[in-house]
Amino acid sequence: MRISQAQRTENENRIRAAMDRLLRGEIPPGGKCDIKTLAHEAGVDRTAFDGTRPYAHLRTEFERRLQALQQLGKIPEPREAQIIRLKDENAKLRERLATSEQTIDELTDFRTQTLARLAAQHEGIVHLRESAAGTGRVSSLAAPRTTVIGSCS
């Protein structure tokens, strides 16, 4: 069934309005920023955007504008933006986890070395105490004799 020029113009206006909404990020629930959602939002058949169909030039325009936004770092689709944000957050968390694991390993090694040193010091103290206690006889030295000079008897 052929459509009139007025109907075609009306359809193109609806498609352009839907295109603008989608590219601003106004994505309907369950939709994406793609041709299928564009066709649904504009109320036209999706196949009208294929090949040599009447709205193929609008598909090209939509894809060009979408790609331009993506190159600028602006992603109109909240779902895609959320996926990118979550991937970045996941990478940061993996880095933090690796750093934490390294710190835990270093602290575990430090603890092991410290306990070994404390055990060695304790053994040294016990040995010194035993050797001091083992010498039951302590000899005291006699005091030196003092002689008085200058007295004759």
Image (cartoon, helix red, strand yellow):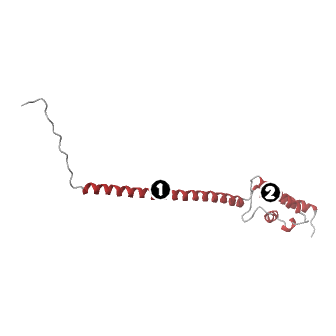
Depth check: 96 or 53 in front?
96
Q: Is residue 94 above or below residue 138?
A: below
Q: Residue furthest top?
A: 150
Specify whether 54 is left or right of 73: right
Q: Residue furthest front?
A: 152
Specify whether 75 is left or right of 114: right
Quadrant showing the N terminus: bottom right
Q: Is residue 43 above or below residue 107?
A: below
The label on residue 110 is 1
Q: Amino acid at mark 2?
A: Gln
Task: Give the mark nearer the N terminus: 2 vs 1.
Answer: 2
Specify whether 90 is left or right of 35: left
- Mark 1 residue element: helix
Q: Residue furthest bottom?
A: 1
Would you identify the image quadrant in which residue 24 lies?
Answer: bottom right
Depth check: 62 or 117 in front?
117
Residue, disc 2: 67
Quadrant showing the C terminus: top left
Residue 102: percent from left, percent from top? 55, 58
Q: Residues within 10 Å of mark 1 (few under 14, many from 20)?
A: few
Would you identify the image quadrant in which residue 50 lies?
Answer: bottom right
Residue 124: percent from left, percent from top? 35, 56
Q: Residue at x 41, y 56 (%)?
A: 117
Q: Residue at x 45, y 57 (%)?
A: 113
Q: Residue at x 93, y 64 (%)?
A: 4
Would you identify the image quadrant in which residue 34 lies?
Answer: bottom right
Nearer the observer, disc 2 or disc 1? 1
Q: Residues within 10 Å of mark 2 (few under 14, many from 20)?
A: some
Q: Amino acid at mark 1?
A: Phe
